[in-house]
Amino acid sequence: MMPIRTTLALLVFNLFLLPEANAAEIEFVSPQGTVKEVRQLTARFSEPIVAFGDPRVVEPFSINCPVKGVGRWADGRNWVYDFENDLPAGVNCTFELKEGLKALDGQAISGQSKFQFNTGGPAIKAILPYGGRIDEN
């Protein structure tokens, strides 16, 4: 049988320290870094941020991108930002978590809060004539 002090210590640990370890966070954001042919950004949170089916739009990120798009919640944890077209070369976008955003259960969101990607420079998509031989005439 455990002494009362040990039992109380375990209880305090479970009540106060474990919820900190399970704080809401962003599990992943894609794309990041240098990426070609971007059409959509996705973010997944560890906890529900909005109630599924809630018609109110909660934009989780402040978006700094020269190309416009539309954000939507796919479900309570997954947010999607759709661009109108594939992004051309030379586009830099930054998505920063809005201050004060909380999970549905009231937990603050911890961890990385700023994500960015760029579409790099121009790239060769095709060479004509095909095959690499060019007649000198």
Image (cartoon, rainbow, N blue to C red):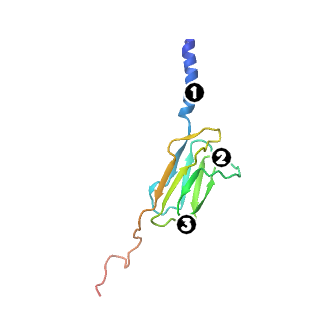
Residue 113's x, y, as percent? Answer: 52, 46
Instruction: Identify the residue position indicated by label 3 in the image.
Output: 85
Instruction: Identify the residue position indicated by label 1 in the image.
Output: 16
Determine which quarter of the picture holds residue 123.
bottom left
Against 102, residue 80 (above or below) is below
Tell me which residue sits at (38%, 75%) in the image: 127
Label 1 residue SS: helix
Q: Distance between the residues labelled 3 and 1?
A: 47 Å
Label 3 residue SS: loop
Q: Label 2: how many residues lie within 10 Å, few (<14), some (14-19) or many (20+)? A: many
The amino acid on which the numbered mark 2 sits, given as a three-letter code, is Val
Tag 3–tag 1 contact (CB < 8 Å): no
Against 131, residue 25 (above or below) is above
Tag 3–tag 2 contact (CB < 8 Å): no
Mark 3 or mark 1, which is nearer to you?
1
**Which of pointers 1 and 2 lies earlier in the amino acid sequence?**
1
Residue 137's x, y, as percent? Answer: 29, 88
The amino acid on which the numbered mark 1 sits, given as a three-letter code, is Phe
The amino acid on which the numbered mark 3 sits, given as a three-letter code, is Asn
Residue 86's x, y, as percent? Answer: 52, 65
Which mark is drawn over residue 50? 2
Q: Residue most toward the bottom?
A: 137
Q: Residue most toward the left?
A: 136
Tell me which residue sits at (58%, 48%) in the image: 98
